[in-house]
Amino acid sequence: MTIKLKTPISEEEIRNLKIGDTVLLSGVIVTARDQAHKLMVEEKPEFIRPYLKESVVYHCGPVVRKDENGNWQFVSAGPTTSAREEPYQSIVIGEYNVRGVIGKGGMGPKTAEGLKKYGAVYFHAVGGAGTLIANRVKRVLDVFKLEEFGTPEAFWVIEVEDFPLVVTVDAHGNSMHKEILEKSSKIAEELINKNV
Amino acid sequence: MQLKEAFLELIRRAATDLPPDVEAVLQKAYEKEDDNTPAKNVFATILENVKLARKQSTPICQDTGSLVFYIDYPEGGKERDYRQAIEWATVEATNRQYLRPNSVDPVTGKNSGNNLGVNAPYIHFHQWDRDEVRVRLLLKGGGSENVGSQYKLPHPPLNAGRDLKGVRKVVIDAVKNAQGLGCAPGTIGIGLGGGRDTSYSLSKEQFFRKIGQRNQDPELARFEEQLLEELNQLEIGPMGFGGKTTVLDVFVGKQARHPATYYVSVSYNCWAFRRKTMTIKNGEVRYDD
């Protein structure tokens, strides 16, 4: 079953999600990669606060273009590897009341703790599905730090519609990544020891 | 068509048009998964994305990778001419958003903004006896490059010795370690022998084979089939969500090794396996996958 969610998202909605749930997300979200996360932890800027409250951070460095009217458009915008934000993520979630993080590859124990403590989840997007996800971005509302950080690292405030996601770390400490790693490691060990 | 424009079209095709053999194996993987599973949904999204990217002529993935060219050219061809045409086409492809700027100086941290840099794009030149030029292009994503690995046999932690049995063990280990991080299901290129550099190089050159195209050596062909079957037993699945397809194919290449060394290089290509070929003969340009 597919669950439809729209930002702003309540803590109750988030705590109802469990790993393996398929979600279609709509509403306003914010892209942020390495430089943006560092800034949010070190300087706690106010400009991004209203967009992040009860909303979602998306680990993404998009390909963008300007249309003939001078408006930004997303061309290709799949997720990037989330592990790089592990040192910052939990602090960002707490500081800005974030309800979810979108990326790929999952995150570590510090983030899992933060998700549990503050009531947030990790959503996994389909890596490589750049064009499809860009088509689900209906509008670019604003961009911050574009000059300073460059296109991939800027904060892009975007409105999405039916962004396809899977919950892989929930607000109760469960992680699909941990489960699959344990299961596949056991199978790998058996295969390796088979000595064919 | 001018040479530089032929290169631009080659890059456009590579970034936006997934080869049909790769699309077909992804379609098969979709059909194999059970309904209402995350794995099935991932394959549905992937397949829809591939069709949209082709139709819109936009990058399949926003990470348009590093550009690696292999050029075979006839006697009398000038490497400088090809290099200049490639550089023009790369800058133009970036301007047209077929490519994301992906060339960063490791010392200053500066992104050149146009995909040019020292050894970027990387070009392997080779002169041959035919009267045509063959250009092969691979767009290699960064996430999948990060999960590649190289082993030195013997590898005591896995009790892997210097034979195909040992190779099998380290390849299973490498794919297990990669989990979903290289945008699974990946295609696995394996280089046996050589030095550390040529071993990795050989593993990557395997990516110019088509899905299902087995090694001509019957022993290695059987070995590829065995690995394909066994790696899919790991149930890592697309994106590491669990599922029946963990790898799309396995290609093994071999070259002579020094008596003292035995390297096994494992290169991982994400599901968005972007390769294209162009042949130029008598001024006519032909594109192939």
Image (cartoon, grey):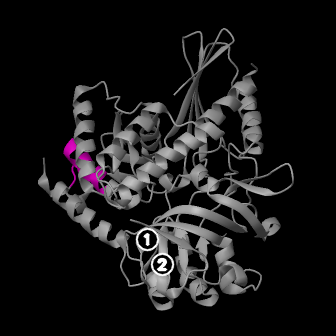
Mark 2 nearby-residue class (10 Å; few <14, some 14–19, many ≥20): many
* Chain letter of the residue carrying label 2: A
* Residue B14 as seen in the image, left or right of residue B226: right
Extent of the magenta region: B160-173
Q: Is residue A191 left or right of residue A57?
A: left
**Can you give x and y, in whole percent of width and height, for residue B239 in the image?**
41, 58
- Report the side of B103 relative to B30 (left or right): right
Residue at 55% over, 62% down: A163
B73 versus B221 height, above or below: above
Give the label on residue B117, or none: none
Identified at 13% across, 51% down, the residue is A195
**Main SS of residues in magenta:** helix
Q: Amino acid under label 2?
A: Val
Mark 1 crowdedness (10 Å alpha carbons): few <14, some 14-19, many ≥20: many
Residue B180, image x, y percentages: 40, 59
Q: CA distance from mark 1 to mark 2?
A: 7 Å
Image location (x, y in percent) of residue B68? 58, 38
Amino acid at pointer 1: Val
The count of marks equals 2
